[in-house]
Image (cartoon, helix red, strand yellow):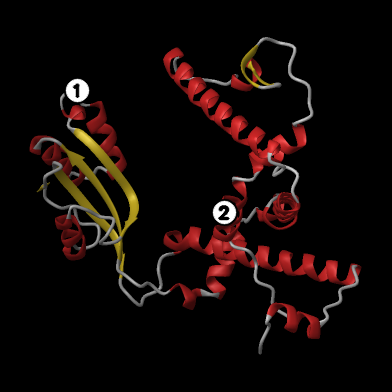
Amino acid sequence: MHLLLPTDDVRHRVFRRTAYLVPFIAVFIGCSREGPSRPYVARVGPVELSEDDLAGPADSIARARGKSMAFINEWVVSELLYQEAQRRGMADSDQLRKQLDATRKRLAVEALLEKEVYGGGADDVHDEEIAGYFKKNVSSFTLREDVARVSYALFSERDGANMFRASILRGSSWEDAVAACQRDSVHRRDLRAVARNQYFTQSTLFPDELWKLARALPKEEVSYAVKTAAGYYVLTVHGIKHVGETPEFEFVKNEVRERLLIERRRARYEQLVSDLRTRHKVEVNLSVADTAGGIGD
């Protein structure tokens, strides 16, 4: 039987569903504990909030005070509600105990999966493994949109952009031209942004005129200074791949790594469950399950 590996999204939803119960677990377990010996910050009946509960780094005294007051107010309201729930017998009800048990079970399972499936050095993936996986499954990474590998420099003034372009046309490499511009006492203030051999799609290379230029510019040719609302761009295209083509490895490297991790984790998850099934006796009474849960074909 193929077992479905819980995704990160599912794991997050589990925590969101159970997070609201965690404070009640802490209160439920610690409600009989004696109060601290240090002076208390707030008190509701016999229960005290200590200074240690408010300790923590803060950017400023004003922010710390505001944060503390918000925490104190929340604590007071929470304690008032809890003590009222206690008075009405709700803090020790069968329903609450079932919720606490279910929450404890979910958190314990999550801790086990974190250790045996998601965590540890088993998630270390080397570049050789990633490259091998890509080569073996290259057909599954076909591009769904055009991708261009681009370098650009953005200047606030046209003179800086033209000087930069001229330097490259005289034979300087892209890196040397950027370094020369950064050393120039006049034009270094004009240099606003630099992209070096980065991958862009139509949705990530903007403004729009840059993408149009990237599609039309011959490979490794340096563009003229292109005026945009952000400033003057000088751009060069190192390569472009189109829809349906195989992308360059570096463009999909992170995606390949994630796929490899998912497969590894699924295998570890299935192995863990398989081992547990052989270690423990499992019985399912289908006739009772059908009646109780309305299970159908």
**Would you name the residue on which mark 1 appears?**
185
Q: Is 73 left or right of 287, judged from the image as shown?
A: left
Q: Position of residue 111 (x, y in %)?
A: 72, 50
From this view, report whether residue 124 is shown above or below residue 293: above
| 296 versus 115 height, above or below | below
Q: What is the count of numbered marks?
A: 2
Using the image as rendered, state which of residue 47 and residue 276 is in the foreground: 47
Location of residue 232 in the rendering, given as x and y in whole percent from the top left corner:
13, 43
**Mark 2 to mark 1 CA distance (whole Å):** 51 Å
Residue extending farthest top? 39
SS assignment at label 1: loop
Residue 241 picture location, percent across and down: 32, 69
Q: Is residue 177 visible?
A: no
Q: On the picture, is 229 further left or further right than 28?
A: left
Of badges 2 and 1, nearer the viewer stands 2
Residue wearing tag 2: 12
Amino acid of disc 1: Ser
Q: Quadrant of the C terminus?
A: bottom right
- Residue 78 visible from this viewpoint: yes
Crowd tier of the residue under label 2, counting other residues whose Cα lies within 10 Å: few below 14, some 14–19, many 20 or above: few
The residue lying at 83 percent from left, 81 percent from top is 285
Which residue is located at x 69 percent, y 51 percent? 119
The foreground one among 136 and 228 is 228
Q: Sequence-wise, which precedes: disc 2 or disc 1?
A: 2
Q: In the rendered image of this protein, does residue 48 appear above or below residue 109? A: above
In the image, 77 versus 90, the foreground residue is 90
Q: To which quarter of the image does residue 46 belong? A: top right
| Type of amino acid under label 2 | His
Please identify the residue farthest to the front as the structure is shown. 88
